[in-house]
Image (cartoon, coloured by chain):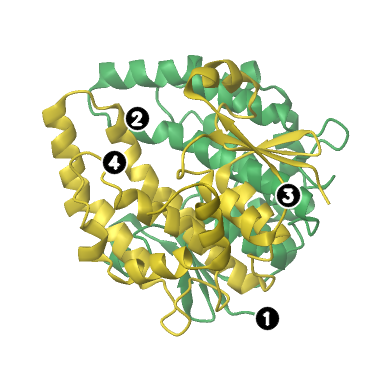
Chain colours: A yellow, B green
Amino acid sequence: MHNLQLSYFDIHGGRGEPIRLALAIGGVPFEDHRVKPADWPAYKPSTPFGAMPVLTVDGRAVSQSNSILRFVGKLSDLYPSDPLQALLCDEIMDAAEDANGLLAPTHVIKDPVELKAAREALAAGKLAAYVASLAGHLDPESGWFADGRMTVADLKVFTFTRYLRSGRIDHLPVDLVERVAPALIGHHDRVRQHPGVTKWYADHGVSY
Amino acid sequence: MHNLQLSYFDIHGGRGEPIRLALAIGGVPFEDHRVKPADWPAYKPSTPFGAMPVLTVDGRAVSQSNSILRFVGKLSDLYPSDPLQALLCDEIMDAAEDANGLLAPTHVIKDPVELKAAREALAAGKLAAYVASLAGHLDPESGWFADGRMTVADLKVFTFTRYLRSGRIDHLPVDLVERVAPALIGHHDRVRQHPGVTKWYADHGVSY
């Protein structure tokens, strides 16, 4: 049993959230270190590549959200042992990261007109296509992305679906997922209703 | 034994190259499908997320370069079986992808003055810091990134080091790696001298 500390922002989402969910579902004890925005600048230089999440494993700090998610997925029995199923799981984790990355350039746009145009272009173009492709990768038989069961890939996409539907991304239609990838709504609900996920959010006062 | 086809551009580098090297080193037979630039627009819509490399495994097309590299690393005995060592290997693969991604926004800059400024800023700032951090992750004892031996993480960084030193990135000093991360030069040479890598490049007429 490793001594684990997860450092991430104090939000119910983002790149740290699927890692927390996997550890909670697997019953793996960890310190849920939540970094306040005011403390981040001082903490940042000590991280491996200047970013969070960071997982400290027996005192060694390791970064990269999907790398960490895969590792905790193994600890939590949420990662396929079959190499081909692991490949399908990995593909979705990386694709979800890419889809999220499409929004990154828009976060630094300061001009409101330009921001609106950029977000609407994504919602009508690349992001919509990416989200639809993600939905197309769901196994119609099991309703999950890989291994015929819920894996860390499902937790990753679940968090992303929630973000897209949250209304927190200005000018991005909150019904984008409903329109272009309705299968992800049912997928979201299946993950949300998993007993481990339900318990985690109940314990943290999250009702949505 | 899977039937494998790797589709990627016909270049000795990029995201497809470490995958080819891993398969070659492991002696894993695969069809090395090289897509000509003129053929890419017609092929693109049939790929899982509109990008290459694509690995077709027994007829099923799978995307995402690091996901594919991890899978072929398992087939080639170039991926750690220990979960913690696998995490360290994954972290470097993802970090190398991030470092490469820093250059992405500059590839679409058309104004030569703006391009020069953007590339020089990266070389003096974020990219330099990232490359130095990568070098800092080399295990000083073994000279490799994880598992005390050459893994797919080394092949990934090797390809990136070659790209940075190639002179093909306008306004990026070709001696950037030498200056900020000299340990990556020795690392490059260790990978380049691996018998499997030497044979691959000899077979393909690559002398550098």
The disc label shown at residue B106, or none: 2
Q: Earlier in the sequence, mark 4 or mark 3?
A: 3
Compared to residue A206, the image places residue B185 above or below, namely above
The disc label shown at residue A29, or none: 3
Who's the residue at 42% across and 73% down the image?
A138
The disc label shown at residue A175, or none: none
- Residue A147 location, x and y as percent? 58, 75
Q: Nearer the viewer, residue A186 or B164?
A: A186
**Disc 4: which residue:** A168
Check disc 1 and give the amino acid type.
Met
Q: Secondary structure at mark 1?
A: loop
Check disc 3 and give the amino acid type.
Pro
Who's the residue at 81% across and 39% down the image?
A58
Q: Is B186 positioned to the left or the right of B42 in the image?
A: right
Q: Secondary structure at mark 4?
A: loop
Work out which residue is located at the far left of the displayed protein and give it.
A113
